[in-house]
Image (cartoon, rainbow, N blue to C red):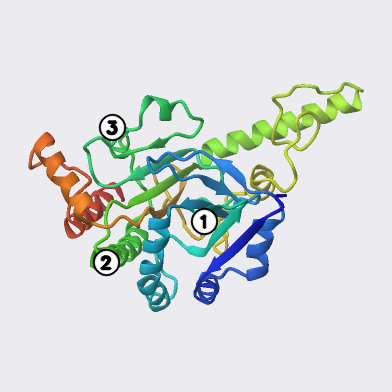
């Protein structure tokens, strides 16, 4: 522990109200963030921000620049009343706290958000969708990751569909439309829909494999055989054990195909009889980009490069929102 450090909490009353509105108990919140050190996780974006996840998988922590802190303060003036007015019914990021951490004179700004994917279900595929097609495919380096973040062109080429049924689709589009209108009024654009897909059949196969491995390990122990395989994970028995409080262990203990609406707030199951039995996690991310001079200049440059009809991501907020909703509407059935 450094000898000199300070923590400043921004807008504590506002964030406490937001946590209440989002159904998050303050004691649970502090327990998740302080029980064990948050884990560093890869960032697929270009912003250079660092991401961490709480030990139980419930919350994400993202570093901010001083400019982003200023934008957060501006956003909160509208975000807080909007969330209250919507009774928390929104797919905007759930901002739960913002802090400045000073260690040996070096300042780091942090914002805490609810994890879109929760901690009960493994996510097998992940997409960052903007409704744009120019430069919207995952890089070769990204694809090498265990769970790459794929993009719009990957989504279209793979023929992905979101099988949630008409009623769920109508509710989701209504919520998305309200959120997009809110962002457009604030002159914000370049946000994404983060989509995580839990493949129920694949999860069941993984569960069977984990049980078989556990049985084999127990049998080896009964026969006096010690498992020294460094690659064994997830069973909690023998070898390289998964810590009992880790997100992976929680998934194995609690994943039974049932969605817990108190925790899996972004989860929507595929409809009965759908082509694929899946659970979808969807929420808006990266909502702080203002359509200012920098973005207007980028729009002009990309238009010259790709042509006036190209679906570039940098466009006026209203045009961005309309295209975004149309893209997602076509992807759902």
Vertical relation: 97 (above or below) 77: above
Q: Is residue 300 left or right of residue 289?
A: left
Q: Earlier in the sequence, mark 3 or mark 1?
A: 1
Residue drawn where x is 21% and y is 58% of the image: 317
Q: Quadrant of residue 215?
A: top right
Give the residue furthest to the front: 105
Q: Are marks 3 and 1 in contact (CB under 8 Å)?
A: no
Indicate which disc residue 186 carries: 2
Alpha carbon of mark 3 to alpha carbon of mark 1: how far? 36 Å
Vertical relation: 62 (above or below) 304: below
Q: Quadrant of residue 154?
A: top left
- The picture places residue 23, in percent across and down from the top left corner, at 56, 70
Residue drawn where x is 73% and y is 36% of the image: 235
| Residue 100 visible to an observer of this rendering | yes
Question: For the residues carrying marks 1 and 2, which lies nearer the camera in this image?
Answer: 1
Q: Which residue is mark 1?
A: 110
Disc 3 packing (10 Å; few <14; some 14–19; many ≥20):
few
- The picture places residue 260, in percent across and down from the top left corner, at 58, 59
Q: Is residue 112 left or right of residue 236?
A: left
**Which sits in the foreground, 215 or 41?**
41
Alpha carbon of mark 2 to alpha carbon of mark 3: how far? 33 Å
Q: Is residue 115 left or right of residue 89?
A: right
Q: Earlier in the sequence, mark 2 or mark 3?
A: 3
Indicate which disc residue 157 carries: 3
Q: Secondary structure at mark 3?
A: helix
Vertical relation: 68 (above or below) 227: below
Alpha carbon of mark 1 to alpha carbon of mark 2: how far? 22 Å
| Residue 275 visible to an observer of this rendering | no
């Amino acid at each position: 522990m450094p000898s000199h450090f300070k923590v400043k909490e921004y807008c504590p009353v506002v964030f406490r109200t937001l946590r209440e509105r989002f159904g998050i108990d303050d004691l649970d919140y502090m327990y998740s963030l302080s029980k064990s050190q948050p884990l560093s996780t890869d960032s697929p974006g270009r912003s250079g921000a660092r991401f961490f996840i709480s030990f139980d998988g419930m919350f994400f922590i993202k570093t901010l620049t001083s400019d982003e802190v200023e934008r957060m303060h501006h956003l909160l003036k509208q975000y807080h009343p909007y969330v209250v007015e919507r009774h928390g019914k929104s797919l905007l990021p759930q901002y739960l706290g913002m802090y400045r951490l000073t260690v040996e004179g070096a300042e780091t700004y942090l914002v805490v958000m609810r994890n879109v994917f929760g901690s009960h279900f493994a996510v097998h595929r992940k997409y960052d969708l903007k409704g744009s097609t120019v430069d919207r495919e995952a890089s070769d380096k990204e694809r090498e990751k265990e769970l790459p973040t794929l993009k719009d062109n990957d989504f279209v080429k793979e023929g992905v569909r979101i099988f949630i049924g008409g009623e769920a689709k109508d509710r989701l589009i209504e919520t998305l439309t309200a959120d997009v209108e809110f962002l457009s009024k604030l002159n914000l654009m370049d946000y994404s829909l983060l989509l995580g897909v839990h493949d129920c059949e694949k999860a069941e196969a993984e569960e069977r494999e984990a049980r078989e491995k556990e049985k084999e390990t127990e049998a080896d122990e009964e026969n006096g055989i010690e498992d020294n395989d460094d690659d064994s994970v997830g069973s909690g028995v023998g070898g390289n054990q998964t810590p009992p409080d880790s997100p992976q262990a929680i998934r194995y203990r609690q994943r039974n195909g049932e969605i817990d609406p108190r925790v899996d707030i972004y989860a929507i199951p595929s409809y009965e009889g759908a082509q694929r039995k899946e659970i979808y996690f969807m929420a808006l991310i990266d909502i702080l980009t203002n359509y200012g001079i920098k973005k207007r200049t980028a729009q002009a440059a990309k238009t010259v490069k790709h042509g006036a009809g190209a679906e570039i991501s940098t466009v006026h907020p209203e045009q961005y929102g309309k295209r975004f909703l149309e893209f997602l509407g076509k992807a759902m059935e």
